[in-house]
Image: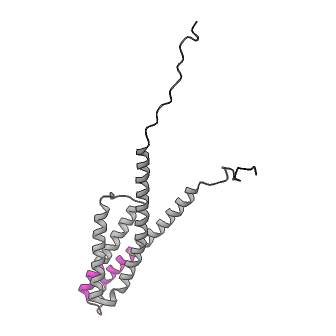
Amino acid sequence: MIRGRPNRQPRSQASPPATGARSIRSLSLLLLVCVVGVVALLMLVSLLDFVLKPDPAVRAGPMYVTLALTTGASLLMFFVALNATFLPVVSRRQVPNLLLVMGAMGVTGVVTGLLTVGSAAGPYITRLIFATMAFTFIMIQDARLARAGVAVAARQADQPAPRPRPRSRQRRGGRKH
């Protein structure tokens, strides 16, 4: 090792650090979206199961409301999670409206379930809580990426346009006599 120069690997053997982080981020986001999707699917199956074969021990009216609201919230959650990660369909300006509807449906479904049917709504509320935790991580990552994009755009806007280098002037025809 020469003094003053750090011992480095040749560039051909070193991998770019951003590639590994990007693939891990994509994999973790995919897993989180899968969690939200599985919960939405389970909620939909539970709703259809209760509609087709209602439990006589549970009051049907409040349970229908609870299942409809929590299933709607989980389906909206899955849609917004897909929109934030892999399949952007809705603009960033419209996402807060979807989040408001999703949150209102979820909270109303949870409160209705707890107050009217009690412990019978427990499994559905637990599923919705798991989906909410995964969804929260997805939205935090989406917000971080949005801030990074804004910061990059701001840096590019702050940089002045590159000026062309001045050329040295040369006369045509060679030297002057």
Quadrant where the C terminus is found in the figure? top right
Instruction: Tell me if 170 is positioned left or right of 118 in this view.
Output: right
Residue 172 percent location from the top left of the image: 53, 13
Instruction: Tell me if 93 is positioned left or right of 2 in this view.
Output: left
Q: Quadrant of residue 42?
A: bottom left
Q: Is residue 174 magenta?
A: no
Please determine whether, in this image, residue 115 is positioned above or below residue 102: below
Residue at (29% x, 60% y) in the render: 94
**Does residue 110 appear in the picture of this structure?**
yes
Q: Quadrant of residue 55?
A: bottom left
Q: Is residue 49 magenta?
A: yes
Q: Quadrant of residue 95?
A: bottom left
Direction left: furthest residue: 61
Which of these two is toward me, 48 or 34? 34
Direction right: furthest residue: 1
**Does residue 68 appear in the picture of this structure?**
no
Which of these two is toward me, 85 or 16? 16
Residue at (34% x, 90% y) in the render: 119
Q: Main secondary structure of the magenta part?
A: helix
Please determine whether, in this image, residue 69 is positioned above or below residue 25: below
Residue at (26% x, 88% y) in the render: 116
Residue at (27% x, 87% y) in the render: 115
Specify start and end residues of the magenta stretch as a single range: 40-67
Residue 93 percent location from the top left of the image: 30, 58
